[in-house]
Amino acid sequence: MRVNEPVTQRENDSMGDEEFICSKTDTNGIITYVNDVFCRVAGFTVGELLGQSHNIVRHPDMPCVAYAWCWDMLGAGRDWRGIVKNRCKNGDHYWVDATISPQVDADGKVVGYFAVRRKPSRAQIAAAEPLYARLCQAEGSLGERGRLSRQAIQSLYQDSPLYQGR
């Protein structure tokens, strides 16, 4: 798990209700496209984001199992939707209601992912915060979470309320 610092715990609420953050990644999660809203809200330039792993905006308050859930859905060829707390370059955070979809070529092979994010409601954030806090607590300290194996994360995910089976 990538640990991005600093973290201020100040919320950046600058995303408008009618705005969308958009990005594309390759199959390894390397950013190939970002829109201006992404750059403005996250505080990065296009040049700072392109070619970087998308986890550059990962906030340490997000549980590993939330990403296991995402990759489980995407690996099954399905769209994923969830509430995500992202980290701004300056350490502030912003919440998004994210939808990520596999992008396929003419032969049906996944060639990347397209993500669209909008501003979530306060009720969505209020529901996600305690769940994510409980999941992070189950995963251990930040240092311990950084050393979790993929197998351990998958096991925690399958024991979490996020897991829906296949």
Image (cartoon, rainbow, N blue to C red):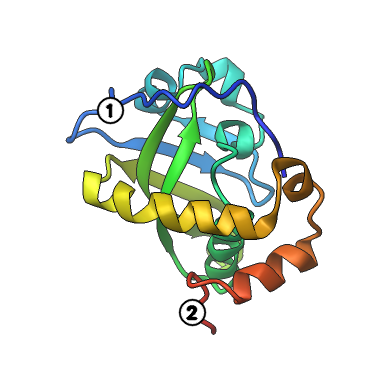
Question: Which residue is at a point 81% across and 59% down the rendered structure image?
Answer: 149
Count the marks: how many?
2
| Amino acid of disc 1 | Met
Mark 2: few, some, or many residues within 10 Å (few <14, many ≥20)?
few
Q: Secondary structure at mark 2?
A: loop
| Of pointers 1 and 2, the one earlier in the residue sequence | 1
- The quadrant holding residue 57 is top right
State whether residue 20 is above or below residue 14. below
Question: Which residue is at a point 48% across and 72% down the rendered structure image?
Answer: 161
Q: Quadrant of the N terminus?
A: top right
What is the x, y in percent for residue 22?
39, 37
- Residues 128 and 101: in front is 128
Res. 59 mark: none
What is the x, y in percent for residue 108?
55, 69
Q: Secondary structure at mark 1?
A: loop
Question: Which residue is at a point 35% across and 25% down the rendered structure image?
Answer: 37
* 5 relative to 24 in the view: left or right: right
Q: Is residue 111 visible?
A: no
Q: Is residue 124 visible?
A: yes
| Amino acid of disc 2 | Gln
* 42 relative to 55 in the view: left or right: left
Mark 1: few, some, or many residues within 10 Å (few <14, many ≥20)?
many
* Pointer 1 residue: 15
* 9 relative to 147 in the view: left or right: left
State whether residue 16 is above or below residue 101. above
Res. 164 mark: 2
